[in-house]
Image: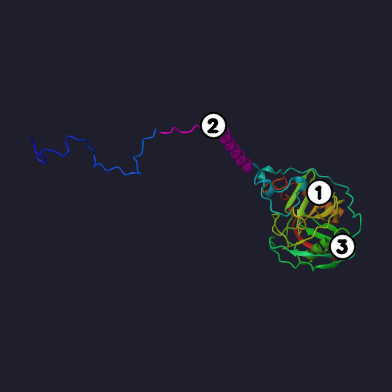
């Protein structure tokens, strides 16, 4: 019999064999038990429908963005309420604009609106600095204080398309009249062009007074609205443009040659003479320039440019 430890014999040859030395059992640390694999959970039909619906909504929103631009709160209002000074964010392609002659009314004019109750005379005006409004042409705002609310002022716009005579009415909007005269006397409008023509039914007007030329410019300050519920905007009316916020007008204005159906929130401060309406009719018939970006609502730069060379004041 071989003796323990003899050559050729392993210790504990007759006992169990382990690949590694056996460790003593330690209480509190049991060996982990084998667990069968857990099959993956099945997605419920309701969850599948919810996921598919979410994907469809995202796709539709992306398509809407590509087709119509930014969401509604960033876009220009609809045509029947869009005479603003904010930059359009959803300009339509030039190919969407028609260069065909537009059908516009001519001949008679609409009656000018009148205040149901005359203003006090004088009234107090205030002009508020607006650091957010681009003002490439630096001007001094009129001084705050009292101004007369009676009488009219004749102004002539000398433009590349012909002269346009205006009659400013202090009884309608005395502070707006003072502001327009101040800008004109400082040469603010000289060299500027009318950037927006609309011949759409319900919005037939030409918008001017932006020193930048894209609808964003102003004088660097704002003026108060001078409106009343009975305001209307028929052929021959001169009125101020503004943003969707009250008291946000500055230098931009619009001249009406046809039908404009908007809410009474745009200050009317004068009228256009017959010769000026003839000039506007000719510009309107020329239509919108299809080579330039539009405003997203069928309006855009006129094909016949209207650039102010000088504004003659008393």
Tell which tag, 2 or 1, sits nearer the viewer: 2
* Main secondary structure of the magenta stretch: helix
Residue most extreme to the left: 1
Distance (Cα) linking label 1 and label 3: 26 Å
Q: Is residue 100 magenta?
A: no
Dot 2: few (<14), some (14–19), or many (≥20) neighbours within 10 Å?
Answer: few
* 294 sits left or right of 206 in the view: left
- Taking the image as shown, residue 204 lies to the left or right of residue 149, namely left
As drawn, the residue found furthest toward the front would be 27
Residue identified by numbered label 3 = 153
Which quadrant of the figure has residue 126? bottom right
Label number found at residue 225: none
| In the rendered image, the vertical position of residue 173 relative to residue 16, given as above or below | below
The answer to whether the residue labelled 2 contacts the one labelled 1, judged by CB atoms less than 8 Å apart, is: no
Tell me where the magenta segment starts and ends, as one range: 37-66
Q: Earlier in the sequence, mark 2 or mark 1?
A: 2
The mark that comes first in sequence, 1 or 3, is 3
In the picture, the quarter occupied by the C terminus is bottom right
The spot of residue 253 in percent (x, y) is 78, 56
Q: Earlier in the sequence, mark 3 or mark 2?
A: 2
Q: To which residue does mark 1 refer?
A: 263
Q: Specify whether residue 38 is painted magenta.
A: yes
Q: Label 1: how many residues lie within 10 Å, few (<14), some (14-19) or many (20+)?
A: few
- Residue 211 is situated, as x and y percent measured from the top left of the image, at 71, 60
Q: Secondary structure at mark 2?
A: loop
Q: Whole-percent x and y of residue 306?
A: 75, 55
Residue of label 2: 44
Q: Which is nearer the eye, 311 or 229? A: 229
Q: Quadrant of the N terminus?
A: top left
């Amino acid at each position: 019999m071989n003796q323990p430890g003899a050559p050729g014999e392993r210790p504990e040859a007759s006992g169990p064999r382990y690949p590694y030395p056996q460790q003593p059992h330690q209480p509190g640390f049991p060996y982990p038990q084998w667990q069968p694999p857990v099959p993956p959970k099945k997605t419920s039909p309701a969850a599948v429908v919810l996921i598919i619906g979410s994907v469809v909504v995202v796709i539709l929103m992306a398509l809407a963005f590509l087709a119509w631009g930014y969401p509604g709160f960033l876009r220009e209002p609809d045509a029947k309420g869009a005479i603003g000074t904010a930059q359009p964010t959803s300009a339509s392609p030039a190919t969407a604009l028609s260069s065909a002659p537009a059908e516009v009314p001519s001949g008679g004019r609409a009656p000018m609106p009148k205040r149901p109750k005359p203003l006090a005379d004088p009234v107090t005006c205030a002009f508020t600095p607006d650091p957010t409004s681009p003002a490439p042409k630096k001007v001094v705002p009129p001084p705050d204080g009292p101004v007369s609310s009676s009488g009219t002022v004749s102004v002539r716009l000398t433009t590349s398309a012909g002269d346009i005579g205006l009659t400013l009415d202090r009884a309608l909007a005395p502070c707006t009249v003072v502001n327009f005269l101040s800008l004109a006397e400082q040469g603010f409008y000289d060299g500027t062009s009318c950037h927006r023509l609309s011949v759409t039914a319900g919005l037939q007007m030409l918008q001017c007074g932006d020193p930048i030329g894209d609808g964003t410019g102003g004088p660097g300050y704002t003026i108060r609205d001078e409106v009343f519920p009975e305001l209307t905007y028929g052929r021959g009316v001169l009125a101020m443009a503004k943003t969707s916020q009250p008291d946000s007008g500055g230098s931009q204005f619009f001249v009406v040659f046809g039908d404009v159906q908007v809410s009474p929130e745009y200050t009317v401060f004068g009228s256009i003479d017959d010769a000026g309406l003839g000039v506007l009719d000719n510009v309107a018939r020329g239509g919108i320039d299809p080579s330039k970006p539009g405003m997203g609502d069928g309006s855009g730069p006129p094909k016949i440019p209207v650039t102010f060379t000088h504004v003659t004041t008393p």
